[in-house]
Image: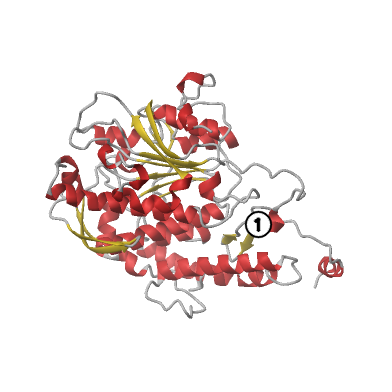
Amino acid sequence: MSPKDRARSRNPGYRRVLSRRTLLRGAGSIAIGLPFLSEMRASSVFAADPPPPPRVLTFYFGLGIPSEYQRDGFMSPHLAPLARVADKLALVRGVYYEKGSRSTGNHARGSETVFVGGRRSGASIDQRVLQEAYGGRAPTRIQSLIAGSYSRQDGQSRHIHSWAAPGIATDAPIEDPKRLFDRTFGSLPMDPGSSGPPSETERARAREARYARSVLDTALEQYRYVTSDAFGLSDESKAKVALHVEKIRELEMNIFDPDAEMEAPPATCRAEDPGVFDHPEMIEIQRTTNNEGVRMDVNRWMRLWRAMVDVSVLAFQCDLCRFGNLQLTSGGERIRLYGSYEAYGQTRSYDDGETTHEYWHRLAPGPVEALMLDHVWLYAAEMAHLFERLDDTVVDENGGTLLDNALVMAGTELGNGRAHDVEDVFHLVAGANGRLRTGVIDVDRQATEVYNAGLRALGLSVSMDGDRDYAGSVASELLV
């Protein structure tokens, strides 16, 4: 025990104060962020809580949800999975990118306008906040985390939804759970510009760098010290750290060895083996340019997607990152699903003869509508999973979760698939430390005005276009 620790042990009133960005350091560049602990509250218990730091997470899915399926709001059976977190969400109806436009080119137009407002007019809302709130450099290990599970790579606008400047992507989406995990918590040496499953060369480098040890194993010694009496954490905080480390262990197991028994996790996880995530269907869904569509087992796809969500959310909860975009499917997605999927008390069966893209454009009462609605339900279920994960852990001194305090937005590309229009485009917003209204909100607003309201909610006096005098172009209906 060090002299400092001995002095602390003799002082029962001693209270350790930790930085919010305290990390468990492991081998090499490995660093594990911690959840919010009471010891991270630097201010007096009698003082007002400091405001949460500005954060933005956007979620994109392709095609869209027709306005007729939004009429009943969160009571709609098609949006039923969102009911558990509906009290923290705003369903914003009546958002448009451009009125009167009917064109097949609107797949690309909608995809590159979402979260920007004007077509290639500037930075997306996540990067606008990063630039305005932090001068373009956040005090976190990762500046922006961009990830997705499906990219139709026949045009940048189809799968890029975070823009640093007009036409300049923030980053290429990471499309492999193992790569995302290593980017966030580990030190996998990656080839520049690569975002899919690791190459054999990269895996060999990873084996050499890690000696087949897990991320957690490399930080085990410091973990033991942090949870010891000498370090000075409260019992509640020790329990939080232990639970947090178990979450990371579970993520490792799910990603690197999904068939392992979780009741008795082994001492090491071999990070070089991506397991089920290197299935040919998964590789195809991440790299396809095939307009005839990818045939995909729905359960295999959802395991991949949820692994991406869980790693990304944990990065935000650990304050390793404050800005990002997650993509479920790219613009103009062409997926043919098969298999049965169970979530939120329902089971949906898929055996698509055509792609969702074709269902979307031929939507009409009857068999095609029933098929499309199964896909709408799937979008809602995966949005709900993301929002529930964002809401499961307190991250700030005001007792709020990411869903409470971060600016969270979900958006898509089209309003009416039959007409290829960009009116009545589905949008959900949440968070901003309670400065946004919740429920169903009807507007007649260009998307820029909705995004400007998000900036106002975060306390920023700038518009999406960089204008600092924009009082008349804010969707004030969204603001508390």
How many numbered markers are drawn? 1
Q: Residues within 10 Å of mark 1 (few under 14, many from 20)?
A: some
Residue 18 placement, left or right of 359:
right
The residue under label 1 is which amino acid type?
A: Thr
Q: Residue at x 67, y 66 (%)?
A: 236
| Residue 155: quadrant of the picture | top left
**Residue 300 vertical position relative to residue 444 in the rendered view, above or below:** below
Q: Residue at x 37, y 29 (%)?
A: 120
* Residue 395, image x, y percentages: 59, 53
Image quarter in which the N terminus is found? bottom right
Q: Residue at x 51, y 61 (%)?
A: 187
Q: Is residue 288 visible?
A: no
* Residue 28, image x, y percentages: 58, 63
**Residue 128 vertical position relative to residue 268 in the rendered view, above or below:** above
**In terms of secondary structure, where does tag 1 sit?**
loop
| Residue 309: quadrant of the picture | bottom left
Residue 193 placement, left or right of 5:
left
| Residue 295: quadrant of the picture | bottom left
Of 331 and 423, nearer the camera is 423
Of 253 and 237, nearer the camera is 237
* Residue 167, image x, y percentages: 38, 32
Tag 1 residue: 22
**Residue 405 vertical position relative to residue 339 in the rendered view, above or below:** above
Q: Is residue 417 visible?
A: yes
Q: Residue at x 66, y 68 (%)?
A: 238
* Residue 82, image x, y percentages: 38, 51
**What colour-coding does the image apply?**
secondary structure
